[in-house]
Structure formats: C-alpha cells, structure tokens
Amino acid sequence: MGIPPVPSPSAVEEASDGKLIRRLLVLTWSYRTEFLRVVIYQIALLALVLAGLGLTGVGIDYVRFVVQPGAPEPHWPFALAPPADWKPMQVMGAIGVAVFVLAAVRALLTYLAQASLNMLTQGRIVVDLRPRVYDKLQRLSFRFFDANASSSIINRVTGDVQSVRMFVDQVLMPTIILVVSFAAYVGFMLSVNVRLTVACLAVTPLIWLCSSAFARAVHPAYRRNRELMDDLVQRLVESIRGIPVIKAYGCEAGEIRRFQQANDIVRDQQHGIFLRLAAYNPTVGFLSQATLFVLLGYGGYLAATGGLPIGTGLVVFAAILQQLAGQISNIANIANSMHQSLRGARRVFDILDEPVEIQSPAAPARPDHIAGRVRFEHVWFDHGENPVLQDIDFAVEPGQCVAIVGPTGSGKSSVMSLLPRFYDPTEGRILLDGIDLRDFEVDDLRRRIGIVFQESFLFSSTVAENIAFGHPGASRELIEKAARIAAAHDFICELPRGYDTVLGEAGIGLSGGQKQRLAIARAVLLDPPLLVLDDPTAAVDPGTEHEIAAAIEAAMAGRTTFIVAHRPAMLRRADVVIVLDHGRIAQTGTHKDLMEREGYYLQALEIQNPRTSINGSD
C-alpha cells in the first residue's frame, strides 16, 4: 500500500481559504437586510446607466435622422415616440431633460448606496465584530497571551477587523456588481447585434486570464506583507514601552535606525507588489483598447452599410465596452482586496475560534462561606512538553501564611497562577474548602481571591475607581477602609483631588510603593478569604519595602495567604515555607526550621545577608 501524498501548503491554504470565504459569506448574510438594500441600489444604478446610454444613443440617431436625408428613423424605447407635431428642438430638449433627470436620480442613488454600504460595514460589521473579538480575548487563558505578541493582538482587534469589512465592500459587493453588470451589458449588446457582440468580447478571456495570473502572483506577497507589518508594530510597541531603558542608555539613534530598517523592509516588499500592479494596469488597458479596435473596424463597417445604428449601436457599444473593460480590470483590485481581507479575517476568526481553556461548569459550586483551606493534590503542570510543576502536594489551613521560595524558573509563579485558575493543572487537582477549583464559577472564584502582582497595573482613571476595579459599585466608605488597611489613605489624601485624582497611564507620577499599596487596597476591597501576593516587594527599594510590608501585614490578617518572597522579614512571618526546585517541592517547614537545615533556603538567605545567624536573626 502506497503512502498517500501530503497536500502541498498552497493546496491546504486554498482549501482553508474556501472555508474562510464561506464563513465570511455567512457573516455577511447575518446582515442580509442591509446588504440586500445595497445590492438593490446597485442594480438600480446599473439600470439607470443603461437607460442613460440608451437615451444618448437615441438622441444621436434622431439628430442623424433630422440632418441626413434618408437616414433611418431612430428606434424609440418602449415605443415612446414623441408627438409628430413636435419640432426637433422640442424632441432634443425632452431627451436632454430625461438624461438630466436620470443623472440626478443616479446621483441620489449613488449617495444612498454608498451611505448604506458604509453604515453596513463601518457602522454594523466592524462595530459588532470588535467587541466580539475583545470579549473573546477577555475569556482566553494566559496560554494564548503567552503565545502571541501584544502587537499581533492589537493588530487583530484594530486592523484585522477592518479586513472583514474589506471583504464586504471591496470583494463581495464589487463581485456582485461585476457579475450583474457583465450579464446586463452583454444582454443589451446581444439585443442590438449578436455578431458584433461576439467579436468585441473575443478579447475578454485574455483580460480575465491576465487578472487571474496577477491575483495568483500577489497572493503570497500580501501574506508576507501582513507578517512584516506585525513586526513593524511589534518594534513600535516595544520602543514605546521600553522608552525609559532606551533613554537611560542613550540608544535613541539606534532604535530610530532599527525602526527605519523595519519600515524600509515593509516599503521594499510593498514595492514589489506595486510593480506588479503597475504592469497589470497598462496590460489590461491595452487589451481593453483592442475591443475598441474591433468595434471601430467591424462596427464601423456595419454602420456604414446600414446594418447598425450609429447612436444606439456604435456609440452605445463603445460606451458599454468601456464600462465592461473597467469592470473586468477591477478583477485585479478585487483579487488584491481578497488576499488582504482573507489574511486579516483568518487572524480574527483564529481568535474567535480559540478554545476557552478556563471555563465554568454547568452547575458550579456556590458555597456561602469560604474558610480558606487549600489543598494541592499531586499537581502537575506544563506549558508545553516539559513540566513546570511536578507532583506538588501540600495542605494549608485557614488563616495560614504560606511563603513560596525557590530559584528563578522553579515554578513559584506557576503555583500562584493556578490558584485563581489563570491556568488549570495538567494532572491532579487543587481544592478550596474541599471543593475542586474547577467546580467553581470562574468569576466567583476570582472574586474570593485578592491578587497583588509583582508589578501592579493601574488604569487611567481615578484613585477610587482603581481601588474599586473589581467591585465598581463599592461605596466610598468601603474604598477608604480598604485604603487604610493597605496604608494608602494618607498619601491618597495628599494627592490634588484625593480619591478623585485621575491617574496617568499605568499610574505614572506615583512611586512604586504607592502603586503597590493601591494594588493591595484593590485586592482586599472585597474582603477575600484568600490573598495571593506574587513577590510584591521585588520591584521596590528596601526603604519602600517597609511601607509595603506594613500594608501586607494588615491585609493578611484573618486570610489564607500565599506569598512569593525572598526577604527574611517577610519569610519569618510565614507559617509555612515551601521551597521549590525544578518544579518539585525540595523543602518544607518554618523559617526557623529551614535555617537549621542545609539546602537552597539557607544558602539563599546567607547570600542575601552573610550576618544571618543559624537561628534566623539578622
């Protein structure tokens, strides 16, 4: 038995594109009322174009009939011939008024069609899709954000959502217009003269082939362009976030040069696309002129021999061929937009299709009271192939403080991330008061856990709103109570507007200790039974550490607390110290016990303070 052939990447991508197009069509159909309204406007516009061309042709034939003895009488559409007693100027005036009215109606319909299309795409599809993508991002686990750069995520919510809009107004709608226009124009031409129509359209397949070849040529180029744009945005985001480091080391010139290089790469890659486009347009234009050559040659012969009217035949044919050429040459623009829209739409749907790893059960446990008893039962956890945590097993009684220590990469932050279910264990389970964390409703569980990160993030809103972020309806009394527990009330009162002071981006203007105390206040506002402190003093100086330590001491009162810490003062406060090494529990005990044993704990503290005695005093 032979081995089945592996599909080529291009074949797989084409199949994927087909599914993506069907999905975009389904999305568009969900707005079918608005979409069909635009289609009706476009069909009406096409009818007005044909009517205007027809009347123009009738006018030319009538002028010929009047000024050239023996010329055939014009063919009046729908047998609407003018009264016999009308003078030529009256007839031409009526035709002119009719053409003007048609032009006015066409202008109105063009406005309505464009306004309706913009309302459909920018006012409905984009506005509806962005919150859907943002909503999904809020529900995805940390694994997704670990695997995707922030610049790529920003691009998906902003630029890539516009790609879905582009599919509707620059791909689907022009395609419908192209098909309907082609059918209408060809039908009109056939009704005038079949042989001339066939002769004039003989070049059309060449235009079609040229457009298809161009579309295939630029397909990979647009995919690469999207990747390069991601790199450019990533460079921009990193340079903005890292501006203190850039300025501290005087590296502005180097960063400007690197950004310019990334920008030049995008420019050069786009240059190749533009060259193809520049070659395509004159090629299609030349082939389009070939149809006019056929028309003037064969059509002129028919007109000269009386087989074709000049106005409704030759002139209208020329105008329709120009319209057709424009529609067919638009295939390249449609293909161009198709590739751009599919690349972006795929990235949007990748987010919408991303499985929500952390989910609430159908019937979640909702205990009225949580004492704070925590048990890790043989917990394993990994981010990929290699386990980060291996067979973690320990129990914590209500109100106890557990310090997690260990070298970098030992799994400390992973333990802390499992408690609020930022991730779920690969094996084993974590119990809170005897209930598996996976049996809680996710939001309910997280509201029972106060979390303070190593570097706490503050939003661009008031101090009070930052403290009450997890409980927007909290009263000012509760907010101030939480601030007092976190030793933040005094410095808040010294701010220009107190609790109503609007903080800058990421709390700019506040010291590191002030930011951490606001974060502690935010964590204790809901009076959670569990407190998770992920090395809250790591990013502050020793002087500020004492300020934060007092706030932490107050926040820990009566709560089960997990803290990642390295400073002896914080470790002596813990009821239990768990030492992790390569994802396993290496040591367990109190600070005093571990200071009497050989191992990582004793070595780490002696390195921090060589004067530390064996009994743990400074």
Image (cartoon, grey):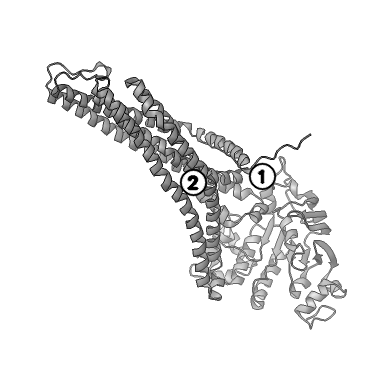
Residue 145 position by quadrant: bottom right
Out of 206 and 122, give the one closest to the viewer: 206
Cα distance in 3D space between marks 2 and 1: 23 Å
Q: Is residue 541 above or below residue 436?
A: below
Which residue is the site of mark 2? Answer: 162
**Residue at (74, 47) in percent of width and height:** 438
Q: Which of marks 2 and 1 is in front?
A: 2
Upstream in sequence: badge 2 or badge 1:
2
Can see residue 194? yes
Q: Is residue 449 above or below residue 406?
A: above
Viewport quadrant of the N terminus:
top right
Can see residue 125? no
Out of 230 and 239, give the one closest to the viewer: 230
Kind of residue sitting beneath label 1: Pro
In the structure shown, which secondary structural element does the residue marked by tag 2 occupy? helix
- Residue 314 in picture, x, y percent from top left: 27, 27
Kind of residue sitting beneath label 2: Gln
Horizontal arrangement in the rendering, residue 382 relative to residue 349 (left or right): right
Residue 331 position by quadrant: top left
- Residue 79 in picture, x, y percent from top left: 25, 16
Horizontal arrangement in the rendering, residue 258 relative to residue 385 (left or right): left
* Label 1 environment density (alpha carbons within 10 Å; few <14, some 14–19, many ≥20): some
**Residue at (79, 75) in percent of width and height:** 604
**Residue at (24, 26) in percent of width and height:** 311
State the residue lying farthest toward the right: 597
Q: In this view, does 42 lie above or below 605?
A: above
Which residue is the site of mark 1? Answer: 355
Residue 178 position by quadrant: top left
